[in-house]
Amino acid sequence: MKQDQNGSLYMNMIFGSLGIILIFLGLLKFLEVEANSSGFILVILGLTITVHYIYHLEKKAGISDKIIWIRALFLILILGSVYYFIA
C-alpha cells in the first residue's frame, strides 16, 4: 500500500512539473505578443509564488527534501533552456 501511495505522489509531482513548464511556455508566448516589460515582472513573481506553494504542499505530503531539490534543479534547467532557445 505504501509503495502504491509513493508512486502516486511521484506521478503527481511529474504532472505538476509539466504543468509549470506549460504555463511558463504560454506566458512566454503571451509576453512575446504583448511586449510589456512590467508584465514580465508580474509573470515571474506569480510563477515563483506558485512554485513555492507547490513545494510547500509536497513537503506536507511527505516527499523528501532530496527529491524536491532534484526536481527543482531539473525544472530550473528545463525552464532556462526553453527560455534560451525560444527567447
Image (cartoon, rainbow, N blue to C red):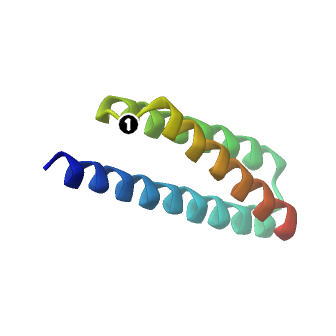
Q: Is residue 4 left or right of residue 48?
A: left
The image shows residue 71, relative to residue 24, as above or below, that is above
Please rate how many residues cluster around mark 1, counting C-alpha atoms within 10 Å: few if below 14, some from 14 to 19, many from 20.
some
Q: Position of residue 86 (x, y in %)?
A: 83, 69
Q: Position of residue 52 (x, y in %)?
A: 53, 34
Q: Is residue 86 left or right of residue 44?
A: right
Q: Which residue is mark 1?
A: 63
34 or 73, which lies in front? 73
Rendered-image quadrant of the C terminus: bottom right
Q: Position of residue 75 (x, y in %)?
A: 63, 51
| Residue type for callout 1 | Ile
In the structure shown, which secondary structural element does the residue marked by tag 1 occupy?
loop
87 or 71, which lies in front? 71
Q: Residue at x 65, y 37 (%)?
A: 45
The image shows residue 65, relative to residue 42, as above or below, that is above
Q: Residue at x 30, y 35 (%)?
A: 61
Q: Position of residue 82 (x, y in %)?
A: 76, 64
Q: Residue at x 70, y 66 (%)?
A: 30
